[in-house]
Image: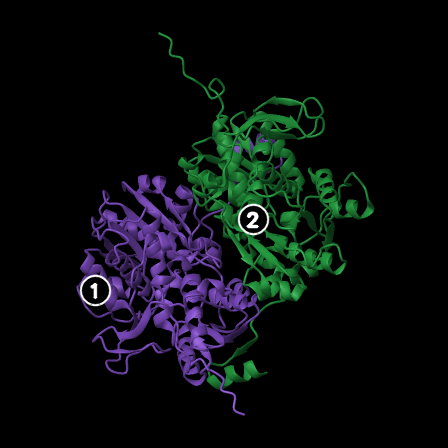
Chain colours: A green, B purple
Amino acid sequence: MTVVVPTPSRRAIDLGPAVELVSKEEGHRQPLAPEFVSPHDFSPLEVAYDFGRVRREDIEAGPRNIWRYKKLLPVPSDVEDIPNTEPGCTRLVRADRLAKELGVRRLWVKDDTGNPTHSFKDRVVAVALAAAREFGFDTLACPSTGNLANAVAAAAARAGWRSVVLIPSSLERAKVLTTAVYDGALIAVDGNYDDVNRLATQLAAEHESWAFVNVNVRPYYSEGSKTLAFEVAEQLGWRLPEQIVVPIASGSQLTKVDKGFHELGELGLVESTPYRVFGAQATGCSPVSSAFREGHDVVRPVRPDTIARSLAIGNPADGPYVLDTVRRTGGAIADVSDDEVVEGIRLLARTEGIFTETAGGVTVATAKKLLDEGSLDPDAETVLLITGDGLKTLDALGDRVGPKATVPPSVEAVQAALDG
Amino acid sequence: MTVVVPTPSRRAIDLGPAVELVSKEEGHRQPLAPEFVSPHDFSPLEVAYDFGRVRREDIEAGPRNIWRYKKLLPVPSDVEDIPNTEPGCTRLVRADRLAKELGVRRLWVKDDTGNPTHSFKDRVVAVALAAAREFGFDTLACPSTGNLANAVAAAAARAGWRSVVLIPSSLERAKVLTTAVYDGALIAVDGNYDDVNRLATQLAAEHESWAFVNVNVRPYYSEGSKTLAFEVAEQLGWRLPEQIVVPIASGSQLTKVDKGFHELGELGLVESTPYRVFGAQATGCSPVSSAFREGHDVVRPVRPDTIARSLAIGNPADGPYVLDTVRRTGGAIADVSDDEVVEGIRLLARTEGIFTETAGGVTVATAKKLLDEGSLDPDAETVLLITGDGLKTLDALGDRVGPKATVPPSVEAVQAALDG
């Protein structure tokens, strides 16, 4: 007797509205698969959709997490029923005190520190995992130095998957602990992040059952960033802001925020009002900002040297597309020094009670710089994307913050310290 | 010409449905005011309400934060319009993998790490600030060693208030930084937490414009804990769980969860089905657990010695009321060793991808113990309250977690490490 067991590759793939992959450069189409580079033009593959009709009511009736947008994502129709970290639906905070300091009329902060592992990476990893399950993978993997490692290890734990996370062995102990606690296979590699990244690509080729979230399932993974745009629009009452400032690492997030806004307009979920997308980098890793300033279409790789480690990608894969997006929408890109990054962190904390990691400091400080140089319009409604948590980059604060005073335990001493 | 300026004390106080304060022991009533002890029987004062009619639809149409429950809290009717940290509406996660490990049929984790400063303290501080504003205070203050300090400093920053936060000068640098970054008046006091606490009470008496959240506005502050109960019930589809496990520090939170469930039943927002409330302590600070085990009505103070520092209150103010609540509902209280706390943290992380601080480790480990000893019913639907974030107590993990291996940058080495 022969028993035919259906394997994932034999049954139909259900990735909701996703219908195929398309190459970014020349538009070559191919079936949905765990691939990330077009064999025809060697450009990145993107998910193409047949959305059908999507109504606000359907979204509003959905769960309070990113799956309310499942009809706009490459995920199975029953995605919310499978255990996952349930990221998203983070706060959009009206930031009047920060607006006043910056001299902006209407300012909002999208605070993604409220996600399960406190960065936007929970969004992209959740989408990657949902797609990876559909393709029949059983292990979730990534190379990372921080937020992504946390998100992958946590998402795999919650789903009951194995995780393989590769980190440089020099990583700070705090970042090691916050990944290791989820008890996946955390492997420290003697080498720098480039070594780790190269190793990940080799391992992805060798292990058919391993989904490297930012390698072989990257087209699905990166679509998760659209949910930030969807939430901003829904939280504004189904309309688009006039300006948005987004930090740039690989550049994927910035392009996906634009894609998200565009899709909402196309589907009639918002009015297609004009918006301008702005990019933020740390000067110590500012290849896209440099290219923008110099009017180039290509991005020259750099060797990162900045405290904003979560943005320290010297050769950003989506750099050229970021330049396209920013120029097309009428935005701009700027970069800020590490000192300005710390001042950005402190400014946001002091005015709005939100403690962001260095990447958020980059966003706030760059917004200030873009205002000063006149590219960001102070009279236009503006959103800042704050993508990660200050608890993860405490070292960046150095000795610049601390108690106002250390006093003996007496009322008089406290009073003197406060008066002094 | 005389201009009469209305002062806060002259205009009517709007604290929504709150009508007066009542003493817990003998029920003496007095007008709403920033007071916390009854002058008649010296017992704690609690807020009394005239709720009127409250409907599920009104709550469901409210904002996605604790202010959706404003008709059940001592806060002004326009509370959501005033800048605040917007805490609450955190995830209630179905925890099937943890349930399986514990041998429980239906288990939920209420994950309060998603709050703005990543603990439930954002809830109580937000309510305290709203009430304090109504009473005319202009400074938000507290003695604290951690979560409360973060929450007060952040809430004050967001509201544009001054904050005065008193900490022991021996506090770990990470905890100092996460409060200092908000740029309030953080004062380090040479002394232990008892010294700091005593100093706070003296300062509260001397400064009429300072609202010490957990001293002179404590009756309002503590009502914020009810929102955890409200959210659990709403997230379960407007019904009560059969069992809930709550960590005990001062004991206030546990009694307020019970109060919240009770109010929902009284108002007809849920069916008044029976529920049992369980308490969790660390053995190194287990005065309430000891009293429960020994059948006492009074709680004998202890000197805390545990890694669960956010629960380390040796003389818990609400200890006797916790005993009442737990006994009345048919629950139980147990305590766990520091080793068990760490195992609890790791168990929750490994099974559900949720990284909690030591207090959450206490809750998980105590739930396990209560199941083992037969007090927690494995067949009854159970909720665990996870009240704070693992990023804040990294030191507790010590050397117990770390990379699986450190290897050279080669595919073979990674493979060998994974196979080994």
Front one among A27 and A165: A27
Q: Dividing the picture into quarters, in which one does residue B396 lie?
A: bottom left
Q: Is residue A283 visible?
A: no
Q: Position of residue B253 (x, y in %)?
A: 33, 62
Q: Is residue B264 visible?
A: yes
Helix, strand or loop at label 1? It is helix
Q: Are marks 2 and 1 on the same chain?
A: no
Can you name the residue that lies furthest to the left here? B295
Q: Which mark is residue B324?
A: 1
Image quadrant containing the N terminus of chain B: bottom right
Find disc 2 in the rendering and name its residue.
A232
Q: Dividing the picture into quarters, in which one does residue B214 lie?
A: bottom left
Question: Compared with residue B199, is residue B175 higher up or lower down, i.e. above or below?
Answer: above
How packed is label 1: few (under 14 Cα within 10 Å), some, or many (20 or more)?
some
Q: Chain of mark 1?
A: B
How packed is label 2: few (under 14 Cα within 10 Å), some, or many (20 or more)?
many
Question: Compared with residue B5, is residue B100 higher up or lower down, i.e. above or below?
Answer: above
Residue type (three-letter) at the residue carrying disc 2: Val
Q: Position of residue A14 (x, y in %)?
A: 48, 26
Residue type (three-letter) at the residue carrying disc 1: Asp
Front one among A177 and B317: B317
| Mark 2 → mark 1, Cα distance in angstroms | 46 Å
Q: Chain of mark 2?
A: A
Q: Nearer the viewer, mark 2 or mark 1?
A: 2
